[in-house]
Image (tube, coloured by chain):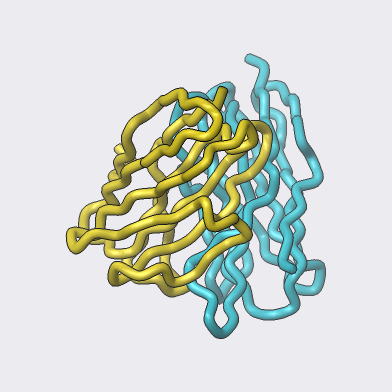
Amino acid sequence: DAGVTQSPTHLIKTRGQQVTLRCSPKSGHDTVSWYQQALGQGPQFIFQYYEEEERQRGNFPDRFSGHQFPNYSSELNVNALLLGDSALYLCASSLGPGAGNTIYFGEGSWLTVV
Amino acid sequence: AQSVSQHNHHVILSEAASLELGCNYSYGGTVNLFWYVQYPGQHLQLLLKYFSGDPLVKGIKGFEAEFIKSKFSFNLRKPSVQWSDTAEYFCAVNALRSGNTGKLIFGQGTTLQVKP
């Protein structure tokens, strides 16, 4: 049991559509990060949320946005979907945003854009 | 920009063989280092981590890794692999610098296939 839960597990969207992915962090964790893992690649950092604010962002366009709720859960939104957005989207949580914290991952949401 | 390089993309071993997976990173400052494993159909799981202290760290399932600062390396080892070790292995680095949070930089992964 990972402790970090994500939904949905799989989804298919059409180019140009918008998608929302959801994440509940491990119990007791207050920080959520999102990663994109393309097939055959390692995960790439999208952004991190702490205290309902985006704290750090990776090299992703503004089409990728997020939100953190008071209960620490989080959403990842992607607008104007491109074929290249097809990937596994991973949510990770930790206790605090600092670099010295262990990060736990969920099972991910598989997004296919057609 | 920081980067992580895993030298072996696909490794095939027989059971009981020894394993060493290479990982090098590019960052001159202080780092936290991790190895994660992803079994087929499962989530990323932490195998081991290095924050400070003894550069030889032991993780779960008999894995260990050695941090060699002068070589910017954090290689993963296991003396005797089992069929159940078949999985994808990822090295990850967190560069400790001002303004940085828990952002992990991952290598592209090594697929380990263990033949029974």
Instruction: Please indicate, yes or no, whether residue B58 appears anywhere in the rendered image.
Output: no
- Chain in cyan (letter): B
Instruction: Quadrant for residue B32, please give it.
Output: bottom right
Where B23 falls versus A38 (above or below)?
below
B92 or A37: which is nearer to us? A37
| Residue at image location 53% in from the left, 34% down from the top | A16
Where B67 falls versus A104 (above or below)?
below
B80 or B96: which is nearer to us? B96
| Residue at image location 48% in from the left, 67% down from the top | B102
Instruction: Quadrant for residue B4, please give it.
Output: bottom right
- Chain in yellow (letter): A
Where B40 falls versus B46 (above or below)?
above
Residue A14 at x, y = what percent? 51, 26
Residue A22 at x, y = what percent? 32, 43
Residue A44 at x, y = what percent? 59, 51
Instruction: Quadrant for residue A28, please give it.
Output: bottom left
For the view shown, which residue lies furthest in the top direction?
Answer: B116
| Residue at image location 56% in from the left, 76% down from the top | B53
Q: Quadrant of the N terminus of chain B?
A: bottom right
Q: Is residue B6 left or right of residue B102?
A: right
B72 or B76: which is nearer to us? B72
| Residue at image location 75% in from the left, 31% down from the top | B10
Q: Is residue A65 left or right of residue B7?
A: left
Instruction: Please indicate, yes or no, whether residue B10 appears anywhere in the rendered image.
Output: yes
Q: Is residue B8 left or right of residue A60?
A: right
Residue B14 at x, y = what percent? 71, 21
